[in-house]
Image (cartoon, rainbow, N blue to C red):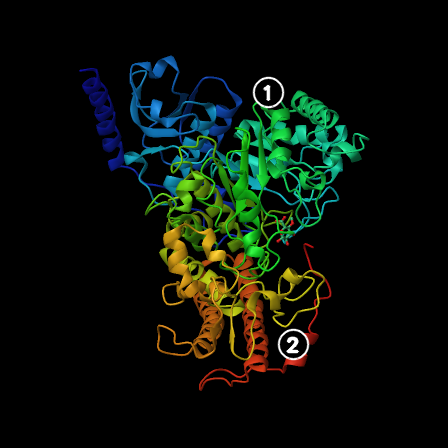
Amino acid sequence: MLGMERRISRIGAWSACLLAGSVLAIGALPGTALANDGYDLWLAPADKGAAAAEVTVIGDSQTLQLAAAELRRDLTAAPLPVVLARADAPELAALGLPTAMLGAEGYLVCAATVAGRPSLLVTGNSDTGVLYGAFAAIRAQKTGGDLAKLDLTSTPKVRLRVLNHWDNLDGSVERGYAGQSLWDWWTLPDFKDPRYTDYARANAALGINGTVLNNVNASPDTLSAAYIAKAAALADVLRPWGIKVYLSARFSAPIELGGLKTADPLDPQVQAWWKAKSDEIYRAIPDFGGFLVKANSEGQPGPRDYHRTHAEGANMLAAAVAPHGGVVMWRAFVYAETDPDDRAKQAYSEFKPLDGKFADNVLVQVKNGAIDFQPREPFHPLFGAMPKTPMMLELQITKEYLGFATHLAYLGPLFEEVLEADTRAKGKGSTVAKVVDGALEGHDLTGMAGVANIGRDRDWSGSTFNQANWYAFGRLAWDPTLSAEALAREWARQTFGDDPRVVDTAVSMMMESREAVVDYTGPFGLAHLMDTGHHYGPGPWVNDLARPEWNPIYYHKADRSGIGFDRTRTGSNAVAQYAPPVARMLADPRTTPETELLWFHHLAWDWKMKSGRTLWQEMVVRYDRGVATVAHMQRQWDGVKDKVDAERWSKTATYLAIQHNEARWWRDASLVYWMSVNGLSLPEGSLAPEHDLAWYKAQRFPYAPGH
Ligand SMILES: CO[C@H]1[C@H](O)[C@@H](O)[C@H](O)O[C@@H]1C(=O)O
């Protein structure tokens, strides 16, 4: 009976809403003819000419006031007055809305009669939930939704949705291509740059609820009193937007900062130091999120220095933050002594035996693939292999290996591909997404991290289209089942307005862009082929670096007889790290997806591909296709010249021209090198390389940004 009343109440409100809707005219979206430097990201203000929504707030929190301000600025021509209220507001009690299922951060946006007045209600169980609901309503309107029919319910599937800034205290950003660090450590904690608020809004609009401020290659100074105060000032700005601050911790900080002789995690003095340090941080930042740690990786100190395990190291830090509700995000990006013949095996070998040994508040943070953010990598074998441990997925938003900020490469499809990959750990459908969102093993502590592409550039991310990668990460962290294409469309509409020609063009370019990069940098699972000193241009010939696994030769193993890394039983047997059905599939080149063929197999140049062509011929086809796709993107962009503001149009057009040259450079340099190894010539119809091998080898970047 009660349920019935609830229904009626909502239906009543609906009809009022629908009536109003009949005269509804949603205001035009921001005029694309206006100059737009992209600073507003997906929060470009609504058309000034349209009537602002009437917004009432029940309750007095700062977060609710911020949510109201967002709605007043961006929601136009609302058919009903908008009411913002937490679900526990007495005014909502009689409605009996189904809010229990929203959890701590979910939202509900629907027509409802509040205090006798038909309204568009935005609610949630927390102030942040309401804020997310407000942003969802704005997004719905900007992407063509009808406010009169709005009925949105959503709860995040992942708990920690976190950006990782690889920002150094000197203002540089490791692998950052969008200018200096956003954080001005020099003027913090006193000056709170308005950009910090803009950053918080942009993130909150996506549902991002955490940020690790500093590089995983962490300076011990980050944990000094002076920097804790600076981090606290940032936390104060971000808090009302539902964003928690985390810090990367250097494992040896007890030595460097504390003057101890050791950082051994089993040493009581070391434990006491971290406990005191954590207490100090929590005094300044009561809702501090916790630590991110890169240990015993690429020269960083760690527990292995003291013959302790990664679990012992992580648990020591976990014990220090546990009383305050903090977590430790412990990275599995290690490659060291174990399995010297195959770097791709090392993290699994080291971490898998530790499953079940980590404290409850530790997440193991794993990159999407076993090497390092390549344009395409098979999913990391650790997903599904550590059922007792929360596995946090680390994605890279900044495009270290996909053309930095210059090349257009929408990463939605890359993210989607890894999330949808089936680990088969518990039968069919054991996707990486289900490992990460905790559904597969019933974990409540879950997380996704994205290495940020944010800097002080006017457009934040080095180019307009790079913003979409930040956007897609944030939305997928909220719901890993969202589609990359739908997110591209959502982003394009909010970024360029609602002209279907522009939106369709942008989406089409975005959806073909990542595969183009795969094609021109290295098709069929080739990876890590870049030149020394940067991760930008080609250098498949490089073989003189100190560590074997830094050399491209190590990865492609091309010789006169064939190309590719044999990771089957006759090679490193890395395939055995996957669940048996996946391992069986990958053990045979005929059942291995062609996109990953040379990642797992060393094959003859005349290996027959599914197309009927030889491997070599097909490789050339792909290299050509990569270059042709960039040319296609250029043509498409030319077609919307009159529809996009000149500033964003011309920067994008120029970057596409650079990309076209460099795609050609990747293709030609790679092909001349492969030909020097295999002695084959180019199939009929393929473009001849412009230069000889010596010329390509001589190319050097004078300066490698971000390194
Ligand atoms: C922060 O260091 C980075 C390093 O710049 C990058 O080239 C490497 O791939 O990955 C490292 C990591 O993820 O720790």
Residue 700 point in image, percent of width and height = 70, 70
Is 705 positioned to the left or the right of 199 in the image?
right
631 lies above or below 91: below
Between residue 677 and residue 55, name the one nearer to us: 677
Q: Foreground residue, 331 or 575?
A: 575
Q: Is mark 1 within 8 Å of ligand 1?
A: no
Helix, strand or loop at mark 2? helix
Mark positioned earlier in the residue sequence (1 or 2): 1
Residue at the limit of the structure toward the top, as seen here:
90
Q: Residues within 10 Å of mark 2 (few under 14, many from 20)?
A: many
Residue occupying image coordinates x 39% and y 79%: 613
Q: Which quarter of the image is occupied by the N terminus? A: top left
Q: Marks 1 and 2, Cα distance to the nearest angstrom?
A: 57 Å
What type is the residue that disc 1 sits on? Answer: Pro
**In the image, residue 69 above or below residue 499:** above
Q: Which mark is residue 207?
A: none
Q: Position of residue 30 (x, y in %)?
A: 45, 47
Instruction: Report the disc number at residue 323.
Output: 1
Q: Point out which mark residue 696 bears.
A: 2
Left or right of 152, for residue 556: right
Please state the horizontal and vertical placement of residue 96, each as a whole percent of the image. Answer: 29, 18
Residue type (three-letter) at the residue carrying disc 2: Tyr
**Where's the C terminus, which quadrant?**
bottom right
Left or right, 313 with reference to 508: right
What is the secondary structure assignment of the residue under circle 1?
helix
Is residue 198 in view from this perspective? no
Residue 666 to residue 89: above or below: below
Q: Residues within 10 Å of mark 1 (few under 14, many from 20)?
A: few
Residue 205, given in percent of the width and then of the height, sits at 47, 37
